Image (cartoon, rainbow, N blue to C red):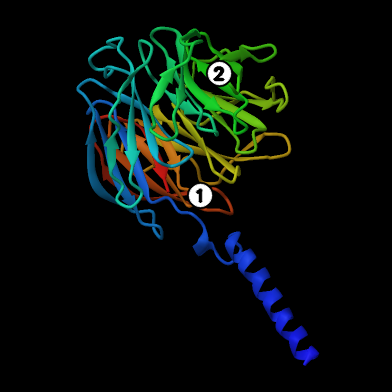
Amino acid sequence: MKGKLRFTLLLLAIAGISLFIWGCGGSSSGSKAVSKYLFVGDTEGDTISRYTIDSSTGELSFLGTTGLPSLSAPTGLVMHPNGDYLYVSNSNSPKSVGWSGNGTVSVFQYDSATGNLIETPNSPFPASSMALQIAITPSGDFVYTTDQMGYNITIFGADGATGDLTEAASSPMAEDEAHGIAMHPSGNFVYMANEDDQEIAGYSINAVTGSLTPVPNSPYPVGDTMVWAAITPDGKYIYSSDSSGSGIHAFSIDNLSGELTSIAGFPIAAPGTGLKSSVITNNGKYIYFTQWDDDSVMGYAIDDADGTLTAIPNMPADSGTTGISPKALSVDVQDRFLYAANYHGDSVDLFNIDDATGELTYVNTYPTGDGPKVLITVP
């Protein structure tokens, strides 16, 4: 009898261990999260184009558009970490019309079952004279927008229950030519790519108020026109690129102070010019840059030991169509697909990512609204 009891207890223990492993995602790739939708900000069309993502192929199916007020010109998209709200920074207005000086942030409740976006009752929220790019802390407590026109950073407190934004007492904060913005994964630091000043500025974030204090020796001159910055998922490295040329700059990040140190051998020259944006895969293995002037995407493997970059084989990649001006990039949660928003092509290109090499293979092109400048994949 005792032997049978011990055997039964052993089976129960093994079953318990198996359930624990399965619950932690150890059973198979099928239990991992996938990107269900792609949202595209159509800057010239004042809309958000919505698509479902085929989890097997990455192919897109058009769901419809979500409208924004006339001349909103969406230029930034970010999801609240709780997955309930999408924040849209509106530069007001499209480049073809000229900046109007009335930047806003629209807030939409996100329905993960349908991909629908429903604007919250108090949206939009006024920002500084422009709300260009946008970032949110991993805690979801604070939202930041850059303002290339008014030379400011707008700081908001975010309510995770309603999505509402409240401008912080320290906002707006002066920052010359702030264009790009990159949030450190720790939530302790945020970095700005300043276009005309040709520098990267770094700030530590007050966890209670959201106010910003320069990190040691900030800003960091780079000598090129910076409009974008991207940080590796482990928070070790930050990369920025020249929007009018081909230079790629890289810094290591001190995770205690936030201070940046230029990495030896940088800047490096990409094969194309007009590097408008970049994206780093979620596993931190690869970084890709849009090459606006060359209608292509360039990619590099990231050395985790020192942050150096090695060109990916058979790159750059493109769809074979000229005059499309790729502006922004996004990858799916599992790093299998890369999407490129083509500003003058009014389209999105889909590429498959080779996990072993990072090489891109063009798959298909999908029409969007007018002038897509930003896009995001969401679970």
Left or right of residue 92, residue 215 in this image:
right
Name the residue located 52 percent from the left edge and 57 percent from the top edge. Answer: 32
Q: For marks 1 and 2, give the one nearer the viewer.
A: 2
Crowd rating for badge 1 (residues with CA inside 10 Å; few <14, some 14–19, many 20+): many
In the image, which disc is placed on residue 209? 2
- Residue 273 in sight in this render: no
Q: Is residue 117 shown above or below 174?
A: below
| Residue 92, image quadrant | top left
* In the foreground, 147 or 83: 83
Seen in the picture, residue 306 relative to 190 is either above or below; the reply is below
The amino acid on which the numbered mark 2 sits, given as a three-letter code, is: Thr
Q: Estimate the x, y position of residue 97 in percent, counting from the top left.
A: 22, 14
Give the mark count. 2
> What residue is at 55 percent from the left and 33 percent from the top?
139
Looking at the picture, tell me which residue is in the foreground, 330 or 207.
207
Name the foreground residue: 259 vs 241: 259
Task: Using residue 15 as the reference point, say whether residue 76 is left or right of it.
Answer: left
The residue that appears at 35% across and 36% down in the rendered structure is 341
Q: Secondary structure at mark 1?
A: loop
Q: For numbered disc 2, what is the local secondary structure?
A: loop
Q: Position of residue 222 (x, y in %)?
A: 59, 15
Label 1 close to label 2 by CB (< 8 Å)? no
Residue 144, compared with residue 324, is above or below; it is above
| Residue behind mark 1 | 335
Residue at the (33%, 52%) spot, across then down: 113
Q: Residue furthest right?
A: 2
Q: Residues within 10 Å of mark 2 (few under 14, many from 20)?
A: some
Query: Can the viewer see residue 186?
Result: yes
Give the image location of residue 80, x and y in percent. 45, 35
The quadrant of the picture occupied by the N terminus is bottom right
